[in-house]
Amino acid sequence: MLQAIGLTSTSRPTAPPAVDDLTFEARPGTVTALLGEPGSGKTTALRLMLELEPGRGVTYFRGRPLHRIAHPGREVGVLLGDVPGNPSRTVRNQLRMLCAAAGVPTSRADTMLEVVGIAGLRDQRLGSLSLGMERRVALASALLADPCTLLLDEPAAGLSPRERGWLHALLRGHASLGGAVLFTTDDAKEAARSADRVVSIEAGRLVADQDAAEFARTRLRPRVAVRTPHAARLADVLGREARAAQRAVEVVEESGSRLSVYGSNCAEVGEAAFRHGVLVHQLADETGDAGAAVSPLPHARAEAGAGGRPPVPPAAEPERSRSRQSRPRRPDSAVRRVGGPLRPLRYELLRVFGTATPVLTAALVITASVLTTLVLARAGHTPQNRLLAAWPELLPLPPAALGAGLLGALAFGEEYRYPALAADRGTVPRRMGLLTTKLGVSAALALLLGAAAVTADAAALALVFDSGPLRTPAEWFSPAVSWAGLLIGCAWAGVLASGVFRSATAGLAAVLAVPVMVVPLVRRILEGPSAYPATGLAARLRGLTWGQWPPEVDRVLLGALRLMAQPVGTALVLSLTVLLCAYGFTGLRSRVRW
């Protein structure tokens, strides 16, 4: 049961609110159409129900508002706008990623591809799909977690009549299993044909809430549909008889053999055709252009199987019905809403490796790093550490650090551009579990990228110059830790900045701002001798612990402190601290807002 009570959007300066005190309900087991002209507030009403837009009023999903539901993606399936996914991601990878977000097995993705009839397109990229196939992917995304309620915004827009019939058969099948379906449309005929109940709104206010039959009888124009091989002759006969009887009858020729007669009935049209000897193939009362009602799911499944599309697995229906009936209902006081993916590590790995971006970034970074190393080696006078890192004095960062920052910036920036968790909030929420996972995965990618770049640089130097520029280092631990810290710091700066500003460009800009802007400021602060040197810090830290650590730990700790005391290390720590505080502040602000 979906109950919308008093939905009112925020007032606009020069116009009334888009939605004003809207109250209606969508019952389980029925398909409800929210009907209105373009600009009447249908989409705004859906966004208010999903708490994606500020306003007043409340919407109850089986007795609970959305923010009191622990896993909203399992309660509500949503289709708002285009398919929320990277165009370069395959259909199967997109659905598997959403499975990890909803906390359902990844095998559910293949099952839903079979249900919506696009199993053969699982390896197609989202950007290459037609509009009809995109709608099928969107419906598969909405149905992944077996939600009780479906909220669909103009699901049939731009589809062919055959695709519309398939879509409404699927929606009616979901309702027949006990679910509630609410879809918006601006076509009154489609609402009368496809829905059990029609809620009409105008300028954001409720106009009527009617059964589909009553809506068709009172809001649509009744007519008589006639099929005859002598359409022109019958139209002339009906026109002459109407003029003779002084009745208002309108005859419209729909095609070469089909007539629509308004202002008459089947008996009058049939008698006129009989009197004048006109052969009639079809004679039926219709309301508007409603046509035949959509068949229930079993009949639609038989037609789909005959047409070559995979039918809905019969065994899945009882299981789905049982899972819906056995779902526990928790009291509101015990429910704490969980945002973000329920399986964050799987979600993040599927997000990262679902596209070719990491591979292309690694290839570009390694190529640029090798070329830079060879140029520096040929010119000479470059320290070995900078030579292996491909980091000349003129560049703020080496290619590997820029690549790590780019991958980190895409960790949140890509999701905000292509929101994968639209059923929850429309964008990926800020949660510490998801952030920790992204930081860990980005750090691992940065280390792999840095190791691959150094290995490729060393191999290129050995191949071109016969290892001439390379010497066995006397101390390798500190440079290795410094290199790893630089890569991880750049990756984390990209992750945090893109999470704060919701933009991959802002994340990469934050990475570049560390050496260009922050490092000079830190260097100026650190210039000159210290009046109180921090010597003996490791020994004092050892005294604060209960146990005694090995003497080798002192060397590691001193090395880490020495690196943090460098301008680059201090700038990275300072930048990461500021970005982490900003991330936490924006997360708290959004939580207070809602």
Image (spheres, rainbow, N blue to C red):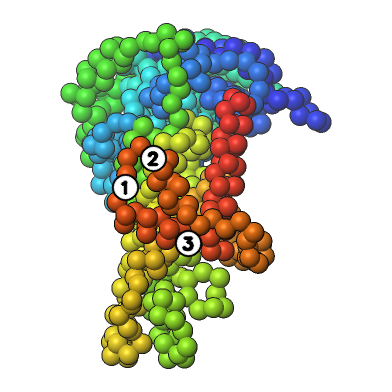
First reached walking from the N terminus: tag 3 or tag 1: 1
Q: Which residue is mark 2?
A: 545
Q: Which residue is mark 3?
A: 563
Residue 43 in view: no
Is residue 54 visible to the viewer in this orientation of the structure?
yes
In the rendered image, the quadrant that contains the N terminus is top left
How far across and down, in percent of the image, does residue 43 sit? 58, 29
Residue 332 at x, y percent in the picture: 46, 10
Outermost residue, right side? 14
Q: Please tell me the numbered disc located at residue 478.
A: none
Query: Is 401 situated left or right of 589 in this image?
Result: left
**Neighbourhood count class around disc 2 (C-alpha, 10 Å): few under 14, some 14–19, many 20 upward:** few
Coordinates of residue 69 in the picture (x, y in percent)? 45, 19
Q: Which mark is residue 549?
A: 1
Q: Residue at x 42, y 61 (%)?
A: 559
Single out the residue that lies furthest toward the left: 315
